[in-house]
Image (cartoon, rainbow, N blue to C red):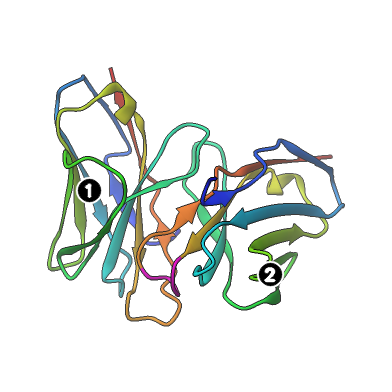
Amino acid sequence: ETGVTQSPTHLIKTRGQQVTLRCSSQSGHNTVSWYQQALGQGPQFIFQYYREEENGRGNFPPRFSGLQFPNYSSELNVNALELDDSALYLCASSSRDAAKNIQYFGAGTRLSVL
Amino acid sequence: QKEVEQNSGPLSVPEGAIASLNCTYSDRGSQSFFWYRQYSGKSPELIMFIYSNGDKEDGRFTAQLNKASQYVSLLIRDSQPSDSATYLCAVGPRQGAQKLVFGQGTRLTINP
């Protein structure tokens, strides 16, 4: 158990809809990173939030957006869902102020777009 | 060229033997290196991290880093059936800052 919680665990949406995924970071951690993992692939970095601001973004379109709240929890929003958005979405929590700043993953949200 | 490359496997190892997993990376500025284990349908679990050249041991696991060759490896001694999983190599640009770049993972099967 990493102390990183994600909700919901599973989600089914149809193409064109919007979705919001949530993540609570581990106690003491102030940084949240989001990753997308397609079947059979390694996780791909979407973006990272630190002190409520986006702090680095991967190669994902603007319809992927996020928020971080004062309690360091975070949301990932995806608009205009496409079939290729079907994947496991992982949230990773870390402490930017710690020397090693290791990222710990939550259990993930499995999104299916039909 | 992929930023982080791993042999996708599957790698099959008999129980009790040493499993050797390899990873190469392209960014010479990379400073932090991680091995995550992922069971089918589950999320990645951190098992080792290494920052300096050489070996780092933790129980049955040894991580090896060679920055000159841009090569990271993970050795699992006395392999157990419970070690059967996909092993993901991840590389960070600085000590833990910002994104991790993952390889596609190596699927390891330990045969009883």
Q: How crowded is mark 1: few (under 14 residues within 10 Å), some or many (20 or more)?
A: many
Image marks 2 and 1: residues in contact by CB distance under 8 Å: no
Q: How far apart are marks 2 and 1 (CA)?
A: 38 Å
Q: What element carries label 2?
A: strand
Res. B81 image quadrant: top right
Three-letter code, disc 2: Asn
Res. A55 image quadrant: bottom left
Res. A43 image quadrant: top left
Q: Does residue A102 appear to the left or right of A18 in the view shown?
A: right
Which label was assigned to residue A22?
A: 1
The x, y position of residue A4, in whole percent, is 35, 58
Q: Residues within 10 Å of mark 2 (few under 14, many from 20)?
A: some
Residue indicated by mark 2: B66
| Chain letter behind tag 1 | A
Q: Does residue B90 appear to the left or right of A56 in the view shown?
A: right
The x, y position of residue B15, in whole percent, is 84, 46
Which label was assigned to residue B56?
A: none
In this picture, is A15 found above or below B93? above
What stretch of residues is rendered in magenta?
B93-97
Type of secondary structure dominating the magenta stretch = loop
